[in-house]
Image: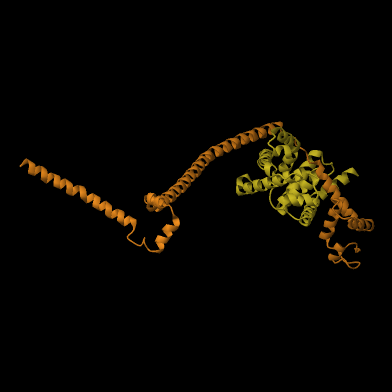
Amino acid sequence: MQKTISSDNWDNAQVGTWNVPVKTELDEELLIAYLDGELDSQNVRQMEDRLSREPELREKMTVFEQTWNLLDSLETVPVDKELVRSTMEVVTLTIEKELNEGEKKLEQRKIPDFLITLAILMLCGMIGYQLMSLYRLSVDRQILDDIPIIQQMNTYKEIGNFDFLKELAKERVFDTPSTDTKIQETLEEELTKPVESSEKNDTQSIETRE
Amino acid sequence: MLQVREDDATAFEELMIRYQGRVFSILRHITGNHDLAEDLTQDVFLRVFRARKNYTPGAKFSTWLFTITNNVAINALRSKRRKPEHQFIFSGESTDSMATIDNSVPEKSALMPTRQLDSQEIQETVRMAITTLNDNQRMAVLLNKFEGMNYADIAQVMKLTPQAVKSLLCRARTNLRTVLEPYVEKGKKIES
């Protein structure tokens, strides 16, 4: 059997010299790829060259072609027209099912969405309330801090000179017990006074009765 | 397919009418069972519809469709093999099936050696010859022969490399030649 080197692929098949048997499988693979139009132009030329010189290969190709063509005799069974209709019915049912499931999912999602919105609103409300409380607290604190000044406002107005007050401060005139303490003392005095007078009144009334 | 992707039922119906016969034909040859092939064809199109949103515009529809068909066929054959009582008559390894065909059709035809095989006999012979192939070989042959797919497309459908498809088709056609060659020869003798 004489074989030729006609492509790199056939080199792999160790067809390097004359009178060396080829690897039939590789030969067949190339032959079938040739019949299927899957070889590149170079390999096609090489295959055609071989076919023109090798009657055995030609014979093999003919048998491959003939057996392949026998497959054309396979009957084509027409599809039942009902199959299209029944498949469409199944598809329609599937669409309906998918739509229903989609609606259900949307409904299920509505509740969490509502809850999420409510939670966000509540959170915003709480934050707002806290901020307002802080603001009020700061205003109240400012008023509390200013109470001693407010209490002495009339006196300060009478003095009417800020520099004079500074002078007094330098001379440590204000280093006496604080005005708050004085006020406290005054209040305590005031509280005790009516009690004593009422007691006196009571004794006087008893004496008169007697 | 783009219209189907946008939930157009009429477009899907048209698509089904156009491709159903081809899908059914492949599945019938793969399973060897008419009713099962019909059920599987329906399953294929249902899957196509369900997966419509995954279809990439520009992708070759037939390749995508036959990829689904191949998956459905593989699953069906697997589940059938798990149930031996429903096993296909001609499924199995090619060597065993070849023995079956060698013992059946040739016997029938050998009784009438001088007569040319009629078309029905040829059909049966070819059908049996196809069943001698394993699942992958059969699918590759059907896609190549009846869908005119090239090696690259078959490779995509069957998730193989084009080189693997080349080898697969070579083995398949060699098997077919082995089984069918006597009938070709017989036809020649009859003709002469």
Can you name the residue that lies furthest to the bottom here? A17
Q: Camera-side residue: A176 or B72?
A: A176
How far across and down, in percent of the image, does residue A112 sit? 51, 42
- Quadrant of residue A53 within the rendered picture: bottom right
Q: Is residue B103 visible?
A: no
Q: Quadrant of the N terminus of chain A?
A: bottom right
How far across and down, in percent of the image, does residue A187 sit? 27, 51
Q: Quadrant of the C terminus of chain A?
A: top left
- State which chain is coloured yellow: B
Please tell me how many numbered marks the rendered image carries.
0
Q: Camera-side residue: B128 or A148?
A: A148
Report the side of B91 relative to B82 (left or right).
right
Report the side of A133 relative to B75 (left or right).
left
Q: Camera-side residue: A43 or B93?
A: A43
How far across and down, in percent of the image, does residue A105 sit? 55, 39
Colouring: by chain
What's the residue at 81%, 51% (across, down)? B177
Q: Is residue A41 visible?
A: yes
Q: Camera-side residue: A122 or B20?
A: A122
Can you name the residue that lies furthest to the left here? A210
What's the residue at 89%, 58% (across, down)? A43
- Quadrant of residue B123 within the rendered picture: top right
What's the residue at 33%, 55% (across, down)? A180
How far across and down, in percent of the image, does residue B40 sit? 67, 41
Report the side of A36 relative to B88 (left or right).
right
Chain A rendering hue:
orange
